[in-house]
Image (cartoon, grey):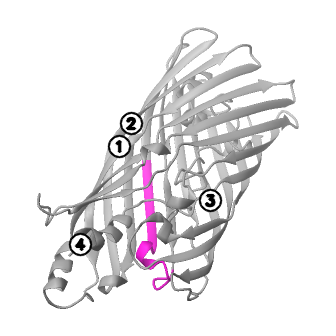
Amino acid sequence: MNIKSLTILSVISVGLFSNTASGAGFHLREQSAAAQGNAYAGSSSAAENNTFAYYNPASLTRMKGLQISAGGTYIAPRASAKNIRYADGRRDADVENVVHAAISPNITVSYQVNDKLFLALAGNSPFGMITKYDREWAGSDHGVTSDVKTATFTPMAAYKLNDKLSLGAGLQVQYVWAHLTNSNRRYGVAGISSDGDALDLGYQLGAMYEFTDNTRVGIGYRSEVKHKIKGEMKADDNMVPGMQGVFLNNLMNQDISVRLNTPAMLSMGVYHDVNEKWAVMAEYQRVFWSSLQNLTFVGKELNRPDAPYITRIKENWRDTNFYAVGTSYKLDEQWKVRFGLAYDQSAVRFAHRTPRIPDTDRIWFSAGLGYDYNEHLSFDVGATYIKAHSAHLETAVTGNEGVHATADYDNSIKVFAFGMTYKF
């Protein structure tokens, strides 16, 4: 009996990725309502409020006194799988609402210690997704439910070396939780669920250089966080009878672990005030998804040197590029409008696309509005429409075992953000 063929679908169930997130892969770029209005152009250099420290901690040196920012982003995807077919050509029903809406919260507290030193603590959810197919759909062996949530807390410090140059650093404390399900109809298993979580550390670095009061550039780096997710796998009881069923029951009901690295990110941006009314900005971000080359599944039970109970799935994700340009216009002393356009590259190639990862390139169209109620209180809103390219899926191409299927995906995302900043 080929143990790899029995366990490979369970390994897929811990592939914690889908098209739910608005960024490529499962990245949630939305951590600032003000930055969203410009499609995150200038997010590492604009430093409009302390939420920009997520992209570059050195931007904190422009935050005076004690400031608190809080907000949230409502991510409303629309994804449908159509033209679904089994390998023998039989047609299955279309699946609507594959991706479910979610809210990504954020909060940042910053404090100016003196003219040189600035401190902050930020909390956000930089990765996550929720996808759900019908339990009996043709590709259920390759994924039914995917629910992944993260929470990251980052204490940061920034130091102003001189009037031009500022440096910043932070420590990422990241928690990840996942619940995933699939089937294995080959062995009569209608449902396999996997649950697990992990808490691990990473770091953040940044620098900002101000050529003049009107022009500045910034660079920010967030390291990868290496997670070892531990949890358990459970399977339905409707398996094949006899000794083979007993073996499968032990195999599919046990403690599990999987290594997952959330990727490193490098951001570089420029911001320029053209005059008292107009400002322009641009951003380039590199997300190092190539750190996700394999998913290795380990079952705690039955793990013997003489049997391949550790299975490795090749993902072969690639590093992605994000490009954004934006502009803002001050209507008066209180109101500001923002606009932005961005292009976001997919981390997944056709040969490695799965139902959990129907990822494609996408274009962002953003607009936003800022309002300074008084010298202490300000509000920001942002709205984005993201159009993803059409995606075709062939599970046989991925090399993952199970009942093969093909499908066509039509995806788009609407994103709405709100933020509030209070300066003491």
Residue 200 lies, with reference to residue 332, above or below; the image says below
Task: Check disc 4 and report the residue beneath it.
Answer: 2
Contact (CB < 8 A) between labels 4 and 1?
A: no
Contact (CB < 8 A) between labels 1 and 2?
A: yes
Element marked by disc 4: loop
Mark nearer the N terminus (2 vs 4): 4
Can you tell which of label 1 and label 2 is closer to the viewer?
1
Circle 1: residue type: Lys
Circle 2: residue type: Gly
Contact (CB < 8 A) between labels 1 and 3?
A: no
Can you tell which of label 3 and label 2 is closer to the viewer?
2
Task: Check disc 3 and report the residue beneath it.
Answer: 74
Circle 4: residue type: Asn
Viewer-proximal residue among 277 and 97: 97
**Which residues make up the magenta segment?**
134-151
Residue at the (24%, 62%) spot, across then down: 256
Task: Check disc 1 and report the residue beneath it.
Answer: 226
- Residue 63: tell me if it is visible: no
Mark nearer the N terminus (4 vs 1): 4
Q: Which mark is residue 202?
A: 2
**What's the CA distance linking mark 3 and mark 2?**
26 Å
Question: Which quadrant does the C terminus fall into?
Answer: top right
